[in-house]
Image: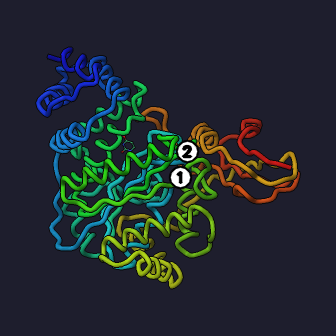
Amino acid sequence: MILDIIDKKRKNEELSYVELDYFFNGYLKKEVKDYQMSALLMAICINGLTKKEIVNLTKIFIDSGEVLKFNTDKIIVDKHSTGGIGDKTTLVVAPIVAACGVPVIKMSGRGLGYTGGTIDKLESIPGYNVNQTPKKIEKQFEDIGIVLCSQSANLVPMDKLIYALRDVSGTVSSIGLIAVSIMSKKIAGGADKILLDIKYGKGALLEKKKDAQELGDIMVDIGKSYKKEVRYILSNMDVPLGYAVGNSIEVFEAIDILCGDEKDNILVDLCVDLASNMVSMGKNISLKEAKKQVLEVINNGKAYNKFLELIKYQGGDIKKLKVSNITQKYKSKKSGIIKDINALSIGKISLSLGSGRVNKEDEIDYDVGIELNKLVGEKVKKGEVLCKLYVNKKINLSILDDVFTIEE
Ligand code: URA
């Protein structure tokens, strides 16, 4: 049966619910081996999954663990990003949305990539407790209307196992598998409405915009079969998002945006766009009206106050947030206009400084990271600082030589 199923997918034939269930739950029970699952995942990567297979596999994933149902009559709007370099949007968007009166419960993961995930960034705030029980989540939700915590271990355990295998078998970038992975977690997490931020470009899982759009359409379809409203935004990930890449350094940047101190760049625009969509979904109002409310809570300080309320409630001490005091400056070797900042290279350098994990058990250094001094499109003079590194030991700066493309 195991080999028949692999063979069927290799021939690009549709697998039934029973076959998918047998194979994936067999893997959970360790009856299907890593090499057999890897073979099926690769056949899926090459031949894709049909709509029916995607909906069936999503159900199998959801059923592998607990499904949360919060005791509230409020609409819960969740957001998910497919991940990117310098992506601190959740830290900005969640307090804005909550300050607009739309409650947010967001469970995030740790990063196993170039930088930490949202949870790692929050843990860079000394004292912040990411582990919450469903009871505590409900209480906090009623008290302050916002919770940012880590996913419970029993939420879609199938995804944890399969994702770890995809990571080491070259099968991460399958559109169908990404859709199943994301939507199973969002549905099991108890969201009523879901906003997806799908990245495309050099620093993203999917390079082509058309693939990102296909992924979005599939996830909207999965949402329909669970009667959940799903919207998606496509955002470019060729260059890092904003000025900061790391962990605590990204929290500092999130604070700047929440205070209205950072304006007119792609990160700020994306945060406003995401928050407006969430408010529009949560309140059933137009995007235009939602955007007005979003800009209002940034300008009148309510968004930043909500952020402070959240950090305090979960035990964090924002005054103790810090970056490393060992720094190095990388200066431009010529004058001109910055045409490109390679997101992938910035991510890899940030990882080498210690801001991300190569293996699950690796410890993150929260205080290291990269702060860009200029963004794409800006002018730079020879000798001017292009970026500042926060490090735990001095490094050879020549690793930055290919990151910036400057045209004279
Ligand atoms: N994010 C997820 O949660 N799963 C994927 O497969 C890809 C991105």
Question: On the rendering, which quadrant does ligand 1 occupy?
Answer: top left
Colour scheme in the image? rainbow
Secondary structure, mark 2, is: loop
Kindly identify the residue that appears in the image at 35 percent across and 24 percent down. 42
From the top left corner, tell me how far across and down residue 227 is, in percent.
19, 59
Query: Which residue occupies the foreground of this view, 312 or 238?
Result: 238
Amino acid type shown at disc 2:
Gly
Query: Which residue occupies the foreground of this view, 122 or 400?
Result: 400
Does residue 305 appear anywhere in the picture?
no
Does residue 62 appear anywhere in the picture?
yes
Q: Kindly indicate whether the residue at mark 1 contacts the one at mark 2 (C-beta within 8 angstroms).
A: no
Amino acid type shown at disc 1:
Asn
Q: Residues within 10 Å of mark 2 (few under 14, many from 20)?
A: some
Whole-number angstrom distance, CA of label 2 to CA of label 1 = 22 Å
Residue 247, label in figure:
1
Q: Is residue 196 left or right of residue 85?
A: left
From the top left corner, tell me how far across and down residue 25 is, in percent.
16, 30
Query: Which residue occupies the foreground of this view, 84 or 310?
Result: 84
Query: Which residue occupies the foreground of this view, 210 or 273?
Result: 210
Residue at image mark 2: 201
Q: Residues within 10 Å of mark 1 (few under 14, many from 20)?
A: many
From the top left corner, tell me how far across and down residue 102 is, in percent.
32, 74
